[in-house]
Amino acid sequence: MSASMAAFFCLGLCLGRVIQAQKGPLPKPSLQARPSSLVPLGKPVTISCQGPPGADLYRLEELKSRKYLDQAELSISAMEQRFVGRYRCSYQSGTSWSPPSNQLELVATGAFTKPSLSAQPSTAVAPGVDVTLRCQSQYSFDQFALYKEGDTGPFKTPERWYQADFPITTVTAAHSGTYRCYSFSSRSPYLWSAPSDPLELVVTEFSEASKKLNHSLVNEVSAAETSRNTTILPKESDPPTGLAFQYYTKSNLVRICLGAVILILLVGLLAEDWHSRKKPLMHRVRAVHRPLPPLPQTQKSHSCQDGGRPDDHN
């Protein structure tokens, strides 16, 4: 019996190894942060490790400190700087451990003043145009990150100071959405600023109906321009309306000019006649009403003594 039991034991062990070899390595788990891996300071977050059903044990590890917890979830009631960093997890099934999950970067936001985000040439562009989103900060940060709502990861740039450009070449409708950017320092890569104000990028697209409508409007405008530029002539016996109007206008101008010249001549004659009549009257009025100055008696007597003749005063 002892020999048979040993044989059965060896057979079972070999079969287990064969079955495990046929199954292959365990699939790696997934690690997620709810509601997001970007957590404002003071807000709650939960890190959860998910593997296949029947896992015996989960291990959650923080890579920088090399501390780990034998549990599938880590609940943080209020985000603090000590919780930031890179995390990964794995699970045990039987005697085997799974490969580690992809790393999760847990970032605390709101540590610094928010930057500004702008779009060049505009926030509303046509398909195929190149757009540049610029993130600017008033501080000398050397790292910037751009996030679009709905995407899992950020767009990061090489080291820049005070600002960073995120070019988007040949935009399509898929680039439409809400964007925000962050600034931070390479010395504290998991401690970011507050998010910028949201920027809404709109990629305008025209449907076939819009194209047809635009085409019809262009045709109507062209027809209207053609009809306006075409001169309609009346009968042969009548002169052209535009030419008659020009003659009428010129004749009126000639009449007005002649009348003005005649009026100026009449005014000149009347003014000259009035001036010639007024001048003698003014002399006559001066002679009658203005008294003469008194004679210089002392000067007259002195001149007679000298043998001279007195002055003649009128």
Image (cartoon, grey):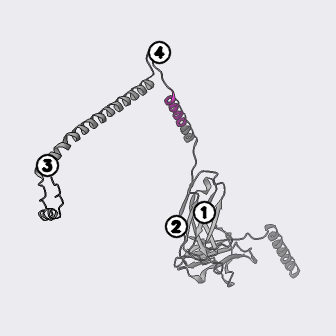
Predominant secondary structure, magenta span: helix
Q: In the rendered image, which residue does mark 3 sit on?
A: 287
Mark sitting earlier along the chain (1/4): 1
- CA separation, marks 1 and 3? 97 Å
Q: Amino acid at mark 4?
A: Glu
Q: Is residue 179 above or below residue 259?
A: below
Front: mark 1 or 2:
1
Task: Give the residue furthest to the right.
Answer: 3
Front: mark 3 or 2:
3
Mark sitting earlier along the chain (3/2): 2
Tell me where residue 242 appears, x and y as whole percent: 44, 26
Question: How many residues crowd mark 2 within 10 Å: few (<14), some (14–19), many (20+)?
Answer: some
Q: In the rendered image, which residue does mark 4 sit on?
A: 236
Q: Which residues are magenta?
A: 216-230
| Front in this rendered view, residue 184 or 229 | 229
Q: Secondary structure at mark 1?
A: strand
- CA separation, marks 4 and 3? 78 Å
Tell me where residue 140 appears, x and y as whole percent: 60, 77
Front: mark 2 or 4:
4
Q: In the rendered image, which residue does mark 2 sit on?
A: 197
Mark sitting earlier along the chain (4/3): 4
Q: Amino acid at mark 1?
A: Leu
- CA separation, marks 1 and 4? 68 Å
| Quadrant hosting residue 19 | bottom right
Residue 202 is at least partly visible in this image: no
* Residue 133: mark: 1
Q: Secondary structure at mark 4?
A: loop
